Every structure is written in C-alpha cells, then in structure tokens.
Image: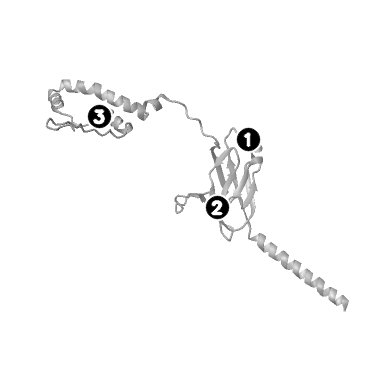
C-alpha cells in the first residue's frame, strides 16, 4: 500500500515538472530579440566606449549591452511596441520605435512625437548614428558692443538727438515744410507751479486770516 502511494506521488511530481517545462518552452518561443548597430564618429574607439553604454527599451523595461564592435542585442522581448534608446554620457542618439508582431516580424520607424501619423520606416536590423556630443553646459554669453548700442536707454537718448539734427536740414531744403513747421503751434497746457504744490503737500493747511476790527468814528468810549 505504501509502495503504491509513493509511486502515485512520484508520477504526480513528474507530470507537474513536465507541464512546467512545456509552459516555459512556450513562453520562451514567444519571446524575440531586438538587435542593431551603432555608428560613432571616426575619432572614437568603440571598444573603449561600449563599456559605459546601455540599450534601453521603453525607458529601462528591457536593458541590453553594447558589444566591442558596436553591435547590440536585447533578448527575451515579448511582442509589442518599444522605444529603443542608447544611454551613455558621451553622445546623443536619436530614439527609434520598433513594433514586434506576435509572429516575430520587426518593423522600425522614426519616433515622431509631434506627428504620430507620419510613418518613416527604417531598415532592420537597426542602425543608430550619433548626432553629436552630449552637452551638459551652455556657453557663457560674451559682451558685445551691439548689446549696448541697441539697449532701450541708449535708443531713447540717440533717436531724439538724431531727429533734432536731421529735421532742421530737411526743412532748410524744403521751404513749404519749413513754413508748415513755423505755423505749427504747440498746444498750451496749464502746468501747476511745482513750488506751490510742494508747499501745499508738506506745509500743512494754510492759517486762517484774522479779520481786522476797525473802530468807527461815531462810536464813543465808555
């Protein structure tokens, strides 16, 4: 009886292991690989640079490494849509969108965020070229003479001066314009006296005048 029970337990264990192996093989058969190549400037050696570079799919959902010959391969990737990015500290690479069907067919295209309906297909395996070196700091702006000449304060001083110098010469050659300028009269504006305004502002209210009492000639003193 005990022997039969042990045989049953062993058979159940073998069946469970077999089903797990089948499920894992089915899962691995549905996983795919994303591969490609990187193009660096001619002055840079890929063998030394590749040690600090990583290939990210969907911002780190799947991570791969760059080989010394500048090729890469990211394994165990299920079907779906992924954004391939090259993370490093030296160069800037343009990200690429990769669509993987359930049958393993790969389709690569440019990542256009502003125009998602605009499809620009790319060849597969991927080939990503460095757009340029990564810049972490902005160049400090240098002082230029044009910045001072075109400043608002300088323009407010120079433009009226130029008008005052050029306008008399223009009117001297044109007698009709000169006559019109002479006939033009500036509107008169009554401006308050500044001294009176300051006295009223800081001097306080004006003192009341005392009425002088004059004695009549016909009054008698008591």
Residue drawn at x 85%, y 73% is 6
Q: Earlier in the sequence, mark 3 or mark 1?
A: 1
The N terminus lies in quadrant: bottom right
Q: Secondary structure at mark 3?
A: loop
Labels 1 and 2 touching (C-beta < 8 A) = no
Residue matched to label 1: 45
Residue drawn at x 50%, y 30% is 140
Q: Is residue 171 above or below residue 31?
A: above
Q: CA distance from mark 1 to mark 2?
A: 27 Å
- The spot of residue 208 in percent (x, y) is 26, 34
Mark 3 residue crowding within 10 angstroms, few (<14) / some (14–19) / many (20+) = few
Q: Locate residue 221: give its quadrant.
A: top left
Mark 2 residue crowding within 10 angstroms, few (<14) / some (14–19) / many (20+) = many
Q: Earlier in the sequence, mark 1 or mark 2?
A: 1
- The spot of residue 58 in percent (x, y) is 58, 52
Residue matched to label 2: 98
Residue matched to label 3: 193
- The spot of residue 184 in percent (x, y) is 15, 28
Q: CA distance from mark 3 to mark 1?
A: 82 Å
Q: Secondary structure at mark 2?
A: strand
Relative depth, front residue between 11 and 29: 11
Q: Is residue 125 left or right of residue 177?
A: right
* Residue 127 seen anywhere in this rendered image of the structure: yes
Labels 3 and 1 touching (C-beta < 8 A) = no
Q: Is residue 4 above or below residue 167?
A: below
Q: CA distance from mark 2 to mark 3?
A: 80 Å
Q: Is residue 43 above or below residue 17?
A: above
Q: Residue furthest bottom?
A: 1
């Amino acid at each position: 009886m005990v022997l039969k029970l042990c045989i049953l337990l062993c058979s159940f264990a073998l069946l469970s292991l077999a089903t797990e192996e089948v499920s894992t093989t089915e899962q691995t058969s549905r996983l795919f690989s994303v591969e490609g190549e990187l193009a660096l400037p001619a002055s840079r050696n890929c063998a030394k640079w590749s040690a600090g570079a990583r290939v990210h799919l969907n911002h780190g959902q799947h991570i791969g490494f760059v080989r010394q010959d500048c090729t890469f391969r990211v394994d165990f990737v299920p079907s779906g849509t992924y954004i391939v990015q090259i993370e490093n500290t030296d160069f800037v690479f343009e990200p690429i969108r990769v669509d993987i069907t359930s049958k393993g067919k790969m389709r690569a295209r440019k990542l256009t965020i502003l125009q998602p309906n605009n499809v620009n297909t790319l060849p597969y395996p991927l080939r990503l070229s460095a757009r340029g070196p990564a810049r972490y700091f902005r160049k400090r702006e240098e002082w230029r003479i044009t910045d001072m000449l075109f400043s608002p304060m300088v323009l407010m001083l120079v433009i009226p001066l130029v008008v005052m110098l050029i306008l008399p010469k223009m009117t001297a050659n044109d007698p009709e314009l000169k006559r019109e300028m002479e006939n033009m009269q500036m509107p008169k504006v009554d401006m308050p006296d500044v001294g009176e305004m300051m006295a009223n502002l800081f001097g306080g209210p004006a003192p009341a005048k005392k009425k002088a009492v004059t004695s009549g000639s016909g009054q008698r003193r008591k």
